[in-house]
């Protein structure tokens, strides 16, 4: 078995990069720029030329959102420390199909796609790792389609909060109810009723621009099976990359 990258995982802050072999890390690391962005930063819109790949670090989160003709933007995938967005598998710079937006601001690694293509041309194991990740991301999108069609907004709300906790490692989420309503594709008033019910059952608290989960196990009981299905596929294809479920701990 090839050696993993010999670097403190806390310094990397991204599980996909942490899964690289030492040799592949040595190829990729010189081209990785440390970069930061605030919540709401648009990385690209549909039709934009994708010039960089982004690797969220620590609690940073990015959403893929499909923009509809009426202006609504519905989330199709949430990407955190387990992955990356932007041309990880495609060959060079291509137009974006969906919007990519920072949902929780923080630190990222960023790499120019021309440099990423050069790195992949040097290493079959690097290409294989990113291809496997693309399969996992596709699985998440497939599951999202099924979830939106089959599960209630209560289940989907619980699922989204749990997914965010797993990726950030904290139950204290810098998130407004309006943001969550947009991502789930529901009206603000509808989501407010769901949030009120969750608060009445002691599962969450809300503060200014924050949602704090108080009973993770209670949310897991309410949520649909979609998070578990995606997590299982990640573990089959890229064991150890998907963040472990957390009960309010600081995570990995």
Image (cartoon, rainbow, N blue to C red):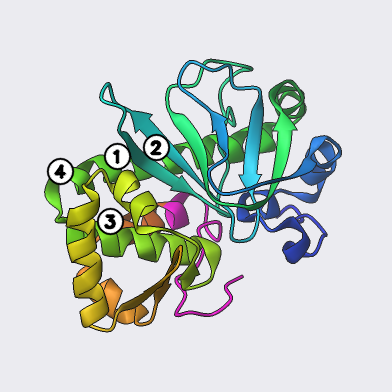
Asked whether residue 245 is drawn in magenta, I would say yes
The disc, 2 or 3, on the residue closer to the chain's N-terminal end is 2
Tell me if 122 is positioned left or right of 244 in this view. Answer: right
**On the image, numbered disc 4 is attached to which residue?**
149
In the image, what residue occupies the spot 58% across and 76% down?
Answer: 250
Number of the front mark, 4 or 3: 4
Give the CA separation, mark 3 to mark 1: 10 Å
Tell me if 20 is positioned left or right of 215 in this view. Answer: right
The secondary structure type at the circle numbered 1 is: helix
In the image, what residue occupies the spot 37% across and 63% down?
Answer: 161
**On the image, numbered disc 1 is attached to which residue?**
142
Q: Position of residue 228 (x, y in %)?
A: 32, 62
Q: Are marks 1 and 2 in contact (CB under 8 Å)?
A: yes
The disc, 4 or 3, on the residue closer to the chain's N-terminal end is 4
Give the CA separation, mark 4 to mark 2: 17 Å
**On the image, numbered disc 3 is attached to which residue?**
226
Question: Where 20 falls versus 101 (above or below)?
Answer: below
The secondary structure type at the circle numbered 3 is: helix
- Dividing the image into 4 quarters, which one contains the N terminus? bottom right
Figure quadrant of residue 28: top right
Q: Are marks 4 and 1 in contact (CB under 8 Å)?
A: no
Q: Which residues lie in the magenta part?
A: 234-252
**On the image, numbered disc 2 is attached to which residue?**
138
The disc, 3 or 1, on the residue closer to the chain's N-terminal end is 1
The extreme front residue here reads: 208
């Amino acid at each position: 078995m090839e050696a993993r990258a010999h670097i403190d995982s806390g310094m990397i802050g991204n599980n996909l990069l942490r899964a690289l072999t030492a040799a592949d890390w040595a190829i990729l690391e010189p081209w990785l720029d440390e970069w930061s962005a605030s919540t709401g930063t648009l990385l690209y819109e549909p039709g934009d030329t994708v010039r960089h790949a982004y690797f969220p670090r620590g609690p940073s989160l990015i959403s893929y959102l499909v923009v509809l003709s009426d202006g609504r933007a519905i989330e199709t995938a949430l990407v955190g420390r387990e992955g990356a967005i932007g041309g990880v598998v495609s060959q060079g710079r291509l137009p974006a199909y969906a919007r990519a937006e920072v949902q929780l601001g923080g630190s990222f690694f960023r790499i120019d796609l021309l440099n990423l293509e050069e790195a992949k041309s040097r290493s079959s194991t690097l290409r294989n790792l990113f291809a496997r990740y693309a399969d996992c991301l596709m699985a998440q999108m497939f599951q999202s389609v099924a979830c939106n069609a089959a599960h209630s907004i209560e289940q989907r709300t619980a699922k989204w909060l749990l997914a965010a906790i797993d990726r950030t490692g904290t139950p204290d989420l810098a998130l407004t109810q309006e943001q969550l309503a947009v991502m789930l594709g529901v009206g603000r008033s509808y989501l407010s009723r769901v949030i009120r019910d969750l608060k009445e059952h002691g599962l969450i608290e809300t503060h200014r621009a924050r949602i704090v989960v108080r009973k993770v196990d209670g949310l897991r009981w309410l949520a649909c099976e979609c998070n578990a299905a995606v997590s299982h596929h990640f573990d089959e294809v890229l064991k150890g990359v998907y963040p472990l479920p957390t009960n309010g701990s600081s995570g990995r």
